Amino acid sequence: MKIASFNINGIKARLPALLDWLSAAKPDVVCLQEIKSQDHLFPREAIEDAGYNLETHGQKSFNGVAILSRFPIEDVTRGLPGDEEDEQARWIEATISGDEAAVRICGLYLPNGNPAPGPKYDYKLAWMERMRVRAAELIAAEEIAVMAGDYNIIPQAGDAAKPEAWVDDALFRPESRAAFRRILHQGWTEAWRDRHPVPGDYTFWDYQAGAWQRNNGIRIDHLLLSPQAADRVQDMGIDAAIRGGEKPSDHVPIWVDLKL
């Protein structure tokens, strides 16, 4: 089962690019972030015509996550537990069954947190603590689980072409990276770094200052695998080439193929 994460940066603006990628890459499951659409306005028919079931958790103009799947999507929950007053659409979960086993998919769009310090950064850290609690529950359940999304975290200096430019940014501040490590230390495998220890691979290039042309990127889209999922990895990749396509997102898909 090929499971991908893709921050689409606006489904209405990027729908042709998404459909082209779905046709070429043929993922079985996709976690989308920043759909920037209310659920009833999402272009559902185009996704269904491409052969996918769809579940969304959207809001007007900002944020929003979705799960696309060639398999049935079951037991869907929306919103990260821990704060009933949080109205930002950043988390969706579902169970998807393959031929041999089922996987719990968590699609997430972690808060950016800038400017830091400040209220937005406090929200980011509080959100990550709520995520840590939910992640611990998934580990305790001993399920095949994948937490896939735009984490807005640069884990290490090697995950940025110019790490010195990010020192004071919420994506790279020590508190952010420490919160990320606390989740990893529960037993999660950060799939790309586990298989590709050499730095220099990125998933985001800003639209400004020719970042794509100069390969001035950062790696902030991650796939975290429970031990039961990590044991089933067959292949993985970053589809970086689509960043050079027409009207691209500033992110590119990252994917893992699990034996399911």
Image: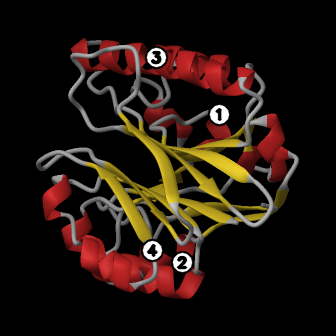
Report the amino acid beneath label 1. Answer: Gln
Distance from the alpha carbon under mark 4 to that under mark 2: 23 Å
Residue found at x 21% / y 16%: 85
132 to 96, vertically: above or below:
above
Nearest to N terminus: mark 3 or mark 4: 4
Crowding near pointer 3: few (<14 within 10 Å), some, many (20+)? some
Q: Quadrant of the N terminus?
A: bottom right
Q: Position of residue 88 (x, y in %)?
A: 24, 32
Report the amino acid beneath label 4. Answer: Tyr
In the picture of the structure, the residue carrying the numbered disc 1 is 156
105 or 18, which is in the foreground? 105
Report the amino acid beneath label 3. Answer: Arg
- Name the mark nearer the viewer: 4 or 1: 4
Task: Please give the label number shown on residue 130.
Answer: 3
Nearest to N terminus: mark 4 or mark 2: 4
- CB under 8 Å between discs 3 and 2: no
In the picture of the structure, the residue carrying the numbered disc 2 is 241
Q: Quadrant of the C terminus?
A: bottom right
- CB under 8 Å between discs 3 and 1: no
